[in-house]
Image (tube, coloured by chain):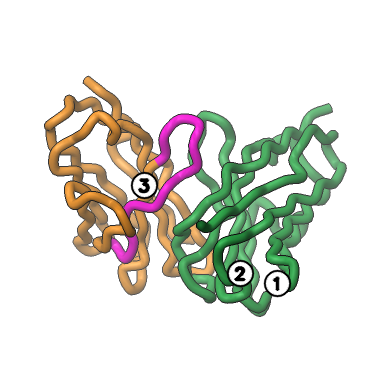
Amino acid sequence: EIVLTQSPGTLSLSPGERATLSCRASQSVSSNYLAWYQQKPGQAPSLLIYGASSRATGIPDRFSGSRSGTDFTLTISRLEPEDFAVYYCQQYGSSSVTFGQGTKLEIK
Amino acid sequence: EVQLVESGGGLVQPGRSLRLSCAASGFTFEDYAMHWVRQVPGRGLEWVSGISWNSGGIGYADSVKGRFTISRDNAKNSLYLQMNSLKTEDTALYYCAKGHDYSNYVYFNYWGQGTLVTVSS
């Protein structure tokens, strides 16, 4: 099973700042099969990024994803008030899907 | 508009069974893999099980293997999760999630709102 470790656990930033969220895989994730989700309180998760760097439909371009080896990064270039939420990474390159434990992005 | 509506959750005693359902609409159900993901309130996401478009590929998390069975009825646009020998640690909100294509190697582009399962004596 591929273990995904997200860091930091909590990130405190202000609107307008840049957010960098990390997701490290315990082994190689085939074919860039990594996705990012946003979850707001009381809501189901929603897809942000798939294939490590492709934005889902309707996702603004301030959200971007990248990969370096087994390290994946979600970057939010300029935080908007609605971006404060919990973010999860997910790998789907193996038949056993796994999620990271989440990063909470909170307002400073 | 894609809609996924879960049902069947509730309070159940340890060792008993429960069957969850997910009614899908707004897309060609038989063309896509479907999955169950659960979340303990206030905690992270845990993948539970997935099934490919034709039920030929099925997978389970180790935590539920041998106790849970996933199935689908393409004629009824429905996904199911039969949960047997329930444990207190199965208490969670169970989400139905649509895969982006037919295989088991999928991300989830749509999610239901979840059905709450509480296992307690």
Relative to A78, B61 lies left or right: right
Q: Are marks 2 and 1 on the same chain?
A: yes
Q: Position of residue A106 (x, y in %)?
A: 29, 26
Q: Residue at x 51, y 29 (%)?
A: B42
Tell me where the magenta segment starts and ends, as one range. A39-52
Chain of the residue under label 3 = A
Name the chain letter of the residue that bears numbered label 1.
B
- Residue B29 tag number: 2
**Residue at image location 35% in from the left, 33% down from the top:** A85
Work out whether residue B87 or residue B93 is closer to the camera in this orientation and state it: B93
Q: Label 3, on which residue?
A: A5
Kind of residue at badge 3: Thr
Q: Are marks 2 and 1 in contact (CB under 8 Å)?
A: yes
Classify 10 Å Cα crowding around label 3: few (below 14), some (14-19), many (20 and above): many
Tell me if mark 2 has few (under 14), some (14-19) or many (20+) residues whose alpha carbon lies within 10 angstroms of its own: many
Classify mark 2: helix, strand or loop: helix
Of the two numbered discs 3 and 1 in the rendering, the one whose residue sits closer to the viewer: 1
Respond whether the residues carrying marks 3 and 1 are from the same subunit.
no
Tag count in the figure?
3
Q: Is residue A46 left or right of residue A54?
A: right
Q: Which mark is residue B56?
A: none
Residue type for callout 2: Phe
Q: Residue at x 73, y 58 (%)?
A: B80
